[in-house]
Amino acid sequence: MKKISFVLSVLMICSLLLSACGLPAPTQSAALDENTINTAVALTLAARSQPEPATRTPQPTETIAAAAEPTITPQPLATLPPLPSATATSDECNHARFEENGDITIPDGSILAPNTAFVKTWRVTNIGTCTWNTNYAVVFSGGDQMGAPVATNLPANVPPGATVDLSVQMKSPSADGDYAGNYMLRSDGGIVFGTGASRMAPIYVSITVKEEQVIPNLDFGGFLPFIPLEFTVYDFGANYCIGNWRNATDPGYLACPGTKTDASGFVVKVDSPKLQDGDTITGVGLLTHPQWIDGGSIAGTFPLLTIENGMKFRATLGCGFGGNACDVRFFLRYRIEGGTLKELTHWDIKYADDPVVVDYDLSALNGKKVNFVLQVVTNGSSAQDWAYWVNPRVIK
């Protein structure tokens, strides 16, 4: 017990001595620092005591754009077709339509004698987007060529929507039989095209060639020759705007069809015209009025035509009904392959006269390639000079 009391006494004395020395007691700040350290240590130990999280295979990062726009195979817009290729563009540019009753001459199955020259004419409309200029051509594309040229250029420009008569000179073969030839159009860029939805359907000519035949005459016991019907070689009325029309003073060509108020002169087509005698003639009338001056004229020049024996120029000539002052001269002129313009014949007609039926033999031009010119000149004043060429054509 004495030892214990001694120890306690010594401790108390030491405590008093320490207090007397002024040693500072631990501050709150130090206590806070220690508490903070202890807390951090505790949290660290607690964290270490937790099990490691399971390792996960990283998932593909979701693309925001893909999530916002579902994956859909794009469909072409109905209103936006694919850009056309050069060929497709050309097809849209060049397209023709064969018109109903478009065989203007030599209908399918026409019967011709061997070695007969003829002109085949088709009526077609430009339903493409490009103008057919005079470098466009009708070209042979297959079948029986029948003496036709490989290519025949168009005689005038044909804008989109316009209708034109296309003519090709041919000759029937020498042997009897059925013959047919196909023709297409060719652009100035060398693109060959035709008609129909495919733009590749040809226009064609189809004939039967037969020698003159003899049939028994039962009444007399003899034989009579079978003479083929005459046919139209070239129809000026159907092709009137292929002709180049002009007067004698103006440098340019007249519009075709023209207008009846044009003081420069005009040509228009009139179906079944009524002439000065009051009769109406079935067919096509070309109403031509010379330039509205004294001595005025109007003339139309047509494409080359090869003439053979037996061909004739046929028409009915007269003044329009009601044109009491009509007094004109009709000329049939010609030019051989670009040569000098010459006169074949002419007819003077006044309103008081009867219409003139013309059946003029062209055999003097046999073998010649001829541009025909239809001309009307006023005899004095041009007032009421309504001059008609009714059904003008070359026949054989």
Image (cartoon, rainbow, N blue to C red):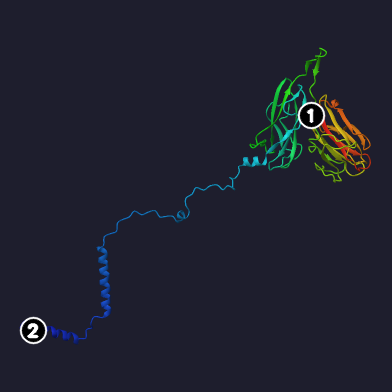
Residue at 70% in and 24% down:
179
- Residue lying farthest front? 219
Q: Quadrant of residue 164?
A: top right
The quadrant the N terminus occupies is bottom left
Q: Dot 1 corresponds to which residue?
A: 233
Q: Nearer the viewer, residue 365 or 81?
A: 81
Q: Nearer the viewer, residue 4 or 396?
A: 396
Instruction: Measuring from the top left, give residue 226's x and y in whole percent.
Output: 79, 19
Q: In the image, 43: left or right of 3?
A: right
- Crowd around label 1: few <14 · some 14–19 · many ≥20 (10 Å): many
Q: Quadrant of residue 212?
A: top right
- Crowd around label 2: few <14 · some 14–19 · many ≥20 (10 Å): few
Q: Dot 2 corresponds to which residue?
A: 6
Q: Amino acid at mark 1?
A: Val
The quadrant the C terminus occupies is top right
Name the N-terminal-most of marks 2 and 1.
2
- Residue contact at pointers 2 and 1, CB within 8 angstroms: no
